């Protein structure tokens, strides 16, 4: 755990330079705009410990995988969103001496991530080995308005000397991934160019042949007066820079503005990329730093209008939730249905920037309530576009007739994961993809989506389940063998309850969806039947038979759902009785020992209870929670949020709050000692769920929005906004009342503590607590 980040409602602040924690800070101070992003590296030279990171969404490399025993069905490669050209670099020399906070004495230092306005701000005063002192003020952002551009204002003040300051703005494409299996570099040069006040580097990824052009242009002033120093353009392999110097006298301030862009062949023709880079960087230059920053602040204000959660009385919780919301909005903006949300977003290399079930199970609930429905729709269409590949993926494993198995990990629809227990067996991801369609429709009423895209995906998924189960003569039931549930500490089990339950639900939802399309869009129904070669009667009867005869493990004595066959044969030990020196067990125990233990990595049965809560009475929920929670080690960041929601549901406020803290400040406080690798972006959506669904008790029951809010004892009040079926609502929870504000133009009815509350357009109602 770390505690050097200062509490603040709207900013993340580091006071004083914590060089030993620099990698953690670089993750925390990451910035992004959905199209690209990067870690909070310094602009000037830094020779201390650092992990350089700049990423362009969608631009990846198929790294060769390392694997012990190759299994048929494994993918050939692991896709990685690549560490890309460093666009932020500005070398600074004072009378020939390099400015480098690793070798200088840092007299003052402050770093701030301004989440309200969307920029990174760093100020410091440093004494160079020669005794010269400079003050630097650096602001940087990636524009969410011009999303292929970024800008930096870098000011240097000569505190105690007169002489020459040399500036060396550069772009450097000679970049390697720290995480590369065979220490290869993944980029080739296409072109480099350097003019007097501009420079360009165009690179191509090996094997995937993406082109990315990075450009820069700059302006400089001295004590407010624009300067035109004679600059020299230089290039070397994958690198271009400009060098110029200014003579300063003590007290002078040089303000250097650098404008940059990244344009890729994902969005422009390869042969035009250099021209596009020139155009983009020229436009940013003409707009100027202040205008770009003002537009950035305005665009962020709008994002916050939709998605902010305010918490009074607990600044740590307030900062935590805003940080999570900010990072999610920096990572995915919903502008492009080819993009998705990697577990680390643009903040590190781990997980390769690729898509997991995290998107559907955790991120979709967040974007559904806090952004235009189009944003979530894009995430769903992403999977629709990968349907053919999911069918091929299932075929590779021996499935047929259009059965689809979506990959565990993917960037372009192909499976990228190769550990057989997960690649072939952690198949519950298919269920989350189907559930996201259902979730989208119940929030937006966009049922037409089913006809357009959703039904085809559901059919592929349902056909997979139909073939994945087998009839057991022994049990007279359908069973699902050789499965890994969300609890990856229990591999290759039979009848994982969560997986079987979500499969059954998929069969039902697909049948209902098929019926809906048949009635409401018969032409499209016929088209889909023909396209998928669907035997409507035969296949739907089979689905019904499976649904009605699926085996679901249940332990009568304890009244709990069985996570998997044999779970109770394991030695039953509770986490509280485990010597803390073994935690996290993933680092301290052998894999063999973990697999034989009853410790649960993350919500598994409880994940199912969370998703299908309406199917269970409160006593059942409580019994399962009381059994599984004490055995859960939460070694996935996706876990505490689900336990928070269930704890809140059954009235265990204390534990609900402790789970919340664990998720909301996971990265800010480096809870799992892994923030240095990047932020847990997808679990940040789980933090949002903890507030809205956990404390706020938001649910959709029979198509109606309901709330059962609780107020953590150390909060004075909190409020959040939610979009539901075209209405925008703000729910505020106080000690004595719950207030509901209808910010939209149509009357809305919701239930609060079981009571119907109808709020006319643009007005408020309240309910006593
Ligand atoms: C979790 C998975 C998750 C992945 C990426 C793993 O540790 O067990 O459920 O999809 O991380 O976040």
Image: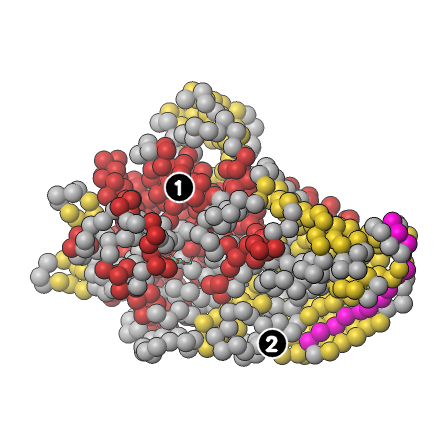
Residue 686 x, y percent position in the rendering: 44, 46
Residue 140 appears left or right of 576: right
Q: Find out whether residue 241 is within the magenta segment.
A: yes
Residue 188 appears left or right of 652: right
Which quadrant does ligand 1 occupy? bottom left
The C terminus appears in which quarter of the rendering? top left
Whole-Å distance between the Cαs marked 2 and 1?
A: 42 Å
- Assign a secondary structure to mark 2: strand
Residues rendered magenta in the picture: 238-251
Q: Foreground residue, 619 or 633?
A: 633
Residue 121, above or below 348: above
Q: Find out whether residue 153 is within the magenta segment.
A: no
- Assign a secondary structure to mark 1: helix
Label disc, if present, on residue 187 of the rendered structure: 2
Q: Which residue is mark 1?
A: 659
Residue 218 appears left or right of 15: right
Residue 575 x, y percent position in the rendering: 29, 47
Can residue 234 be seen at all in this image of the molecule?
yes
Q: Which residue corresponds to the image point at 46% horizontal and 77% vertical from the top-left?
A: 64
Category of crowding for the residue at label 1, using alpha-carbon neighbours closer than 10 angstroms: few (below 14), some (14–19), many (at least 20): many
> Outermost residue, front direction?
130
Q: Are marks 2 and 1 in contact (CB under 8 Å)?
A: no
Q: Which residue corresponds to the image point at 49% horizontal and 65% vertical from the top-left?
A: 352
Q: Which residue corresponds to the image point at 42% horizontal and 55% vertical from the top-left?
A: 358
Sequence-wise, the earlier of marks 2 and 1 is 2
Q: Which residue corresponds to the image point at 86% horizontal and 68% vertical from the top-left?
A: 231
Q: Quadrant of residue 143?
A: bottom right
Q: Quadrant of residue 165?
A: bottom right
Q: Quadrant of residue 469?
A: bottom left
- Select label 2 or label 1 by which is in front: 1
């Amino acid at each position: 755990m770390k505690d050097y980040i200062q509490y603040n409602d709207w900013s993340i602040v580091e006071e004083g330079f914590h060089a030993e924690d620099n990698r953690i800070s670089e993750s925390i101070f990451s910035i992004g705009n959905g199209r690209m992003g990067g870690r909070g590296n310094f602009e000037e030279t830094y020779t201390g410990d650092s992990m350089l990171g700049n990423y362009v969404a969608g631009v990846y490399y198929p790294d060769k995988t390392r694997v012990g025993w190759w299994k048929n069905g494994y993918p050939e490669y692991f896709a990685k969103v690549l560490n890309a050209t460093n666009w932020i670099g500005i070398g600074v020399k004072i009378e020939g001496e390099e400015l480098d906070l690793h070798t200088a004495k840092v007299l003052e230092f402050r770093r701030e991530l301004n989440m309200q306005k969307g920029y990174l701000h760093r100020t410091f005063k440093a004494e160079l080995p020669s005794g010269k002192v400079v003050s630097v003020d650096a602001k940087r952002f990636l524009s969410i308005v011009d999303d292929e551009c970024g800008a930096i204002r870098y000011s240097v003040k000569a505190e105690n000397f007169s002489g020459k300051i040399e500036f060396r703005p550069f772009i450097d494409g000679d970049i390697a991934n720290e995480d590369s299996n065979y220490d290869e570099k993944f980029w080739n040069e296409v072109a480099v160019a350097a003019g007097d006040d501009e420079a360009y580097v165009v690179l191509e990824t090996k094997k995937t042949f993406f082109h990315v052009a990075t450009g820069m242009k700059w302006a400089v002033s001295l004590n407010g007066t624009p300067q035109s120093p004679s600059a020299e353009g230089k290039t070397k392999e994958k690198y271009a820079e400009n060098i110029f110097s200014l003579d300063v006298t003590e007290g002078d301030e040089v303000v250097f503005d650098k404008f940059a862009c990244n344009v890729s062949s994902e969005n422009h023709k390869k042969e035009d990329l250099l021209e596009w880079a020139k155009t983009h960087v020229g436009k940013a230059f003409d707009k100027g730093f202040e205008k770009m920053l003002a537009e950035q602040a305005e665009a962020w204000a709008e994002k916050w209008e939709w998605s902010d959660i305010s918490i009074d009385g607990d600044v740590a919780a307030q900062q935590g939730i805003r940080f999570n919301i900010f990072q999610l909005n920096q990572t995915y903006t919903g502008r492009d249905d080819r993009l998705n949300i990697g577990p680390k977003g643009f903040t590190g290399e781990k997980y390769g920037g690729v898509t997991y079930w995290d998107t559907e199970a955790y991120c979709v609930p967040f974007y559904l309530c806090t952004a235009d429905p189009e944003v979530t729709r894009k995430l769903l269409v992403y999977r629709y576009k990968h349907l053919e590949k999911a069918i091929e993926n299932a075929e590779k494993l021996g499935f047929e007739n259009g059965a689809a198995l979506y990959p565990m990990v993917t960037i372009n629809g192909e499976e990228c994961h190769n550990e057989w227990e997960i690649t072939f067996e952690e198949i519950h991801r298919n269920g989350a993809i189907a559930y996201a369609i259902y979730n989208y429709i119940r929030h937006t009423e966009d049922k037409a989506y089913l006809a357009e895209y959703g039904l085809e995906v559901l059919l592929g998924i349902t056909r997979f389940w139909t073939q994945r189960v087998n009839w057991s003569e022994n049990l007279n039931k359908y069973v699902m063998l050789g499965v890994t549930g969300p609890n990856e500490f229990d591999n290759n089990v039979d009848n994982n309850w969560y997986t079987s339950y979500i499969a059954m639900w998929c069969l039902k939802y697909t049948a209902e969806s098929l019926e809906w399309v048949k009635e409401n869009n018969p032409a499209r129904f016929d088209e889909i039947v023909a396209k998928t070669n669907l035997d409507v009667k035969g296949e739907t009867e089979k689905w019904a038979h499976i649904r009605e005869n699926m085996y679901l493990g249940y332990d009568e004595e304890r009244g709990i759902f069985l996570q998997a066959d044999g779970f109770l044969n394991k030695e039953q030990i509770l986490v509280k009785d485990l010597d803390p020196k073994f935690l996290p067990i993933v680092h301290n125990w052998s894999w063999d020992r973990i697999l034989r233990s009853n410790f649960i990595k993350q919500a598994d049965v409880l994940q199912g209870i969370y998703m299908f809560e309406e199917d269970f009475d409160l006593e059942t929920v409580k019994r399962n929670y009381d059994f599984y929670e004490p055995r859960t080690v939460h070694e996935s960041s996706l876990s505490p949020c689900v336990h928070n929601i269930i704890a809140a549901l059954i009235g265990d406020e204390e534990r609900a709050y402790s789970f919340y803290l664990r998720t909301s400040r996971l990265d800010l406080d480096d809870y799992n000692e892994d923030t240095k690798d990047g932020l847990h972006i997808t679990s940040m959506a789980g933090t949002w769920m903890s507030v809205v669904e956990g404390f706020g008790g938001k649910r959709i029951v029979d198509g109606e929005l309901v709330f059962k809010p609780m107020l953590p004892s150390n909060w004075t009040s909190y409020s959040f906004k939610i979009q539901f079926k075209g209405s925008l609502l703000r729910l505020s929870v106080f000690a004595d009342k719950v207030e509901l504000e209808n910010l939209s133009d149509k009357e809305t009815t919701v239930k609060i503590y079981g009571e119907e509350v109808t709020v006319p357009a643009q007005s408020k109602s309240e309910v006593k607590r």
